[in-house]
Image: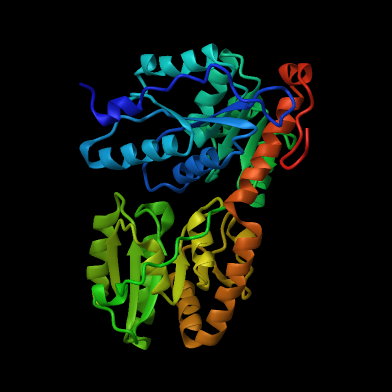
């Protein structure tokens, strides 16, 4: 008998008679979100699921395809939970057992889906899925192919050529998550401005804190100052810069606690750095946590020390938690944080500057609170998941209306319009 994971990888059949849609063409547009994985702690993967779950069900039928759904025993529960959550939200799910790049036959269920059903839009997320979304979308005659770069990094050579000649040329739209990313796509990768589309990220509001005394559980007193950073422990996130910056200012703030939430391959190197700097009392690597809202509620300042970034969901979560933000001036971060308005921006790889920015906020808690309040209002106003999804819905509908299939059907109104 198949286990729960195997059962979840089987795509349910499409309804025999789809309900009439406000699209005006008598049916909902069928949209496939293509991603590597579900059930991970990656921001892009969470965002992909939320897009699928929040598309207007009166106008769209959502399907998520995870191309690397086979899971280790350690990950099994999380991927099963993710697939079950999609099903509960009315989203059909297809998991491919693609363990390596050589497993070409693992693509067969996706090809069958695209050919058997009238898929109108395929929306691929991140570099690998962008490639496959273009290849299979075009081979299978999907009218609209949207590709989405969640964290842009310029690399001369094959990636730049693939981005420009395959992904951008094969897409109806190539989404950038920040204005800076779009500028670099156009100026450095020479992608057509008509294909490069800026769609800001958004998040749903953080769930309310549980009320648990997280400080007490972690052995932190009520009078200690707490700085928190959430992210993968890998080199592009530059956690070493945060550790070094914290070690520089720790003597000035005897009660300083820096909480670093996340896991990654570079954890041993960061543990060694903490030991070498003698920062064991002030810097704590907490690993993966499911209580991030509680940790943020117990914090005074939030930090992102990254070297490169698109439009970081972690910064939006900091803003939603009413925390002042210290972050590096890279990628799309300046789109989120205005310097000295919602927090402080510093140059990447500047441990001294990062430490001094944290110290400045800790020395002026009243101004820090004001920055946090302003950031909270901006996040709710400009960077909400429902705003992002509405932008995507309108993009899908606009692109579809220009296709041969779309022109044969009645005009497709935007959200809220009456057919």
User: Picture coordinates of residue 66 (x, y %)?
Assistant: 42, 30
Vertical arrangement, residue 142 with respect to residue 79, above or below: above
Vertical arrangement, residue 386 with respect to residue 130, above or below: below
- How is the protein colored in the picture? rainbow
Point 61% across, 31% down: residue: 60
Figure disc tally: 0
Left-right relation of 70 to 180? left
Point 38% across, 77% down: residue: 226
Determine if residue 198 is in view.
Answer: no
User: Picture coordinates of residue 40 (x, y %)?
Assistant: 36, 44
Q: Between residue 173 and residue 192, name the one nearer to us.
A: 173
User: Picture coordinates of residue 205 (x, y %)?
Assistant: 52, 59
- Quarter of the rendering occupied by the C terminus: top right
User: Picture coordinates of residue 252 (x, y %)?
Assistant: 37, 87
- Quarter of the rendering occupied by the N terminus: top left
Determine if residue 342 is in view.
Answer: yes
Point 31% across, 42% down: residue: 78
Q: Between residue 107 and residue 239, name the one nearer to us.
A: 107
Left-right relation of 416 to 95? right
Left-right relation of 392 to 106? right
């Amino acid at each position: 008998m198949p286990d729960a994971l195997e059962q979840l990888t089987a795509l349910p059949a499409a309804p025999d008679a789809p309900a009439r849609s406000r699209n005006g063409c008598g049916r909902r547009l069928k949209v496939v979100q293509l991603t590597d994985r579900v059930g991970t702690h990656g921001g892009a993967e969470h965002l992909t699921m939320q897009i699928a779950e929040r598309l207007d069900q009166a106008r769209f039928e959502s399907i998520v395809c995870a191309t690397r759904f086979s899971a280790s025993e350690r990950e099994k529960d999380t991927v099963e939970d993710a697939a079950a959550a999609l099903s509960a939200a009315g989203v059909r799910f297809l998991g491919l057992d693609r363990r390596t790049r050589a497993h070409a036959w693992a693509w067969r269920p996706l090809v069958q889906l695209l050919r058997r059903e009238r898929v109108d839009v395929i929306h691929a997320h991140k570099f690998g899925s962008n490639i496959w979304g273009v290849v299979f979308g075009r081979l299978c005659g999907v009218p609209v192919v949207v590709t989405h770069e969640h964290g842009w990094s310029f690399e001369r050579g094959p990636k730049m050529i693939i981005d420009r000649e395959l992904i951008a040329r094969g897409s109806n739209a190539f989404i950038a998550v920040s204005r800076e990313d779009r500028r670099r796509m156009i100026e450095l990768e020479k992608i057509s401005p008509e294909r490069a589309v800026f769609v800001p990220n958004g998040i749903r509001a953080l769930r309310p804190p549980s009320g648990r005394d997280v400080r007490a559980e972690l052995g932190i007193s009520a009078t200690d100052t707490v700085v928190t950073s959430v992210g993968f422990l890998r080199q592009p996130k530059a956690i070493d810069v945060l550790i070094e910056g914290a070690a520089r200012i720790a003597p000035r703030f005897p009660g300083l606690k820096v909480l670093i939430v996340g896991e990654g391959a570079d954890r041993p190197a960061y543990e060694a750095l903490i030991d070498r700097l003698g920062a064991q009392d002030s810097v704590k690597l907490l690993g993966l946590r499911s209580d991030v809202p509680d940790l943020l509620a117990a914090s005074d300042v939030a930090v992102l020390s990254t070297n490169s970034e698109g439009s970081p969901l972690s910064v939006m979560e900091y803003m939603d938690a009413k925390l002042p933000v210290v972050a590096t001036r890279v990628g799309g971060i300046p789109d989120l944080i205005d310097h000295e308005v919602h927090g402080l921006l510093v140059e990447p790889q500047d441990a001294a500057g990062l430490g001094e920015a944290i110290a400045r906020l800790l020395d002026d808690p009243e101004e820090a609170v004001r920055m946090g309040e302003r950031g909270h209002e901006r996040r709710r106003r400009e960077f909400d998941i429902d705003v992002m999804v509405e932008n995507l819905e309108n993009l899908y509908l606009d692109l579809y209306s220009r296709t041969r299939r779309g022109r044969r059907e009645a005009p497709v109104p935007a959200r809220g319009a009456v057919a």
